[in-house]
Amino acid sequence: MSARLRLKDRLEAGRPAGGLFVSIPAPEIVEIAAVAGFDFVLVDLEHTLIDGADLERMIAAADRAGVSALVRVPGAGSERILQSLDAGAAGIVVPRVSSAAEAAEAVRRARYAPRGIRGLNAGRLGRYGDCDLPGLPARLDAQTLVVAMIEETAGLAAAAAIAATDGLDGLLFGAADYSQAIGLPWQTGAPAVAEAGAAVLRACREAGIHAFAIVRSEADLPRLRDEGVRGLLVANDRGLLRRALSEADRGWRTILEASR
């Protein structure tokens, strides 16, 4: 399943990868993202009620379409880490990681022994047993991405320790929730929020792990590139759909009004 490795391969080659945040439980969204040229999708289980069957279909769609599928799980101790990875996700994104201990717990659940407790399963990734089963855990560990989100002041204070966690592949700064944590809800461009984001990226560089970012403005892209960000979440499905529908609705109304 080469699609699973598309994101990891680009990151390790130092090439940018464009991602779509997905909250709508529809495989068609994943397929359209692939047609549009995205390298990966990030399926959100934290703020949605996407169930296991829908998630499995979305990951399968990513495999068919040629994009990697990351899954944002509910938390570091979630059982959905195992289920998402067994369904074929390229990796997990863990929200609200506030300590190295939480990062280590996420790694523990996502990795096989001896680094973790991920259970053995000869499912999709093991071709239902038609593979080198003894070698499968090491291969999947090498392919799987584990990313922690820094979204609170405690997480920012521990960013260096979190980034240094053995088995962690990257960090993603959650500017919206961080802005709320410091009393500036949705002010993602506030100087204090920008400084926190820069500190998270600095922790990534110092630890030698991958830096991810949620792109708020195209004007930020050159700076993010220069700061070493390669995993770029450049859009979200609900926002794109709302803007496209709003534009379509304004279009026909404007034309009819002008012709009266």
Image: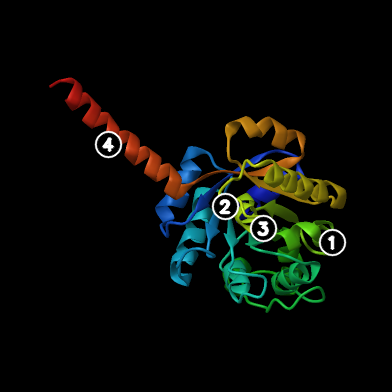
Judging depth in this view, the residue of 50 and 114 nearest the camera is 50
Judging depth in this view, the residue of 145 and 175 nearest the camera is 175
SS assignment at label 2: loop
Identified by mark 3, the residue type is Glu
Taking the spot 67% from the left edge, 71% from the top edge, the residue there is: 76
Identified by mark 1, the residue type is Ala
> What residue is pinned by disc 4?
249
Question: Could you tell me how far apart the alpha carbons at marks 2 and 3 are, in whole angstroms?
Answer: 12 Å
Residue 226 x, y percent position in the rendering: 76, 33
Q: Nearer the viewer, mark 4 or mark 2?
A: 2
Residue 170 x, y percent position in the rendering: 74, 54
| Number of other residues with Cα within 10 Å of mark 4, as a class: few under 14, some 14 to 19, many 20 or more | few
> What residue is pinned by disc 1?
161
Q: Nearer the viewer, mark 3 or mark 4?
A: 3
SS assignment at label 1: helix
The disc, 2 or 3, on the residue closer to the chain's N-terminal end is 3
Residue 137 x, y percent position in the rendering: 73, 70
Identified by mark 4, the residue type is Asp
Question: Could you tell me how far apart the alpha carbons at marks 4 and 2 are, in whole angstroms?
Answer: 30 Å
State the image quarter where residue 16 is shown: top right
The disc, 4 or 2, on the residue closer to the chain's N-terminal end is 2
The disc, 1 or 4, on the residue closer to the chain's N-terminal end is 1
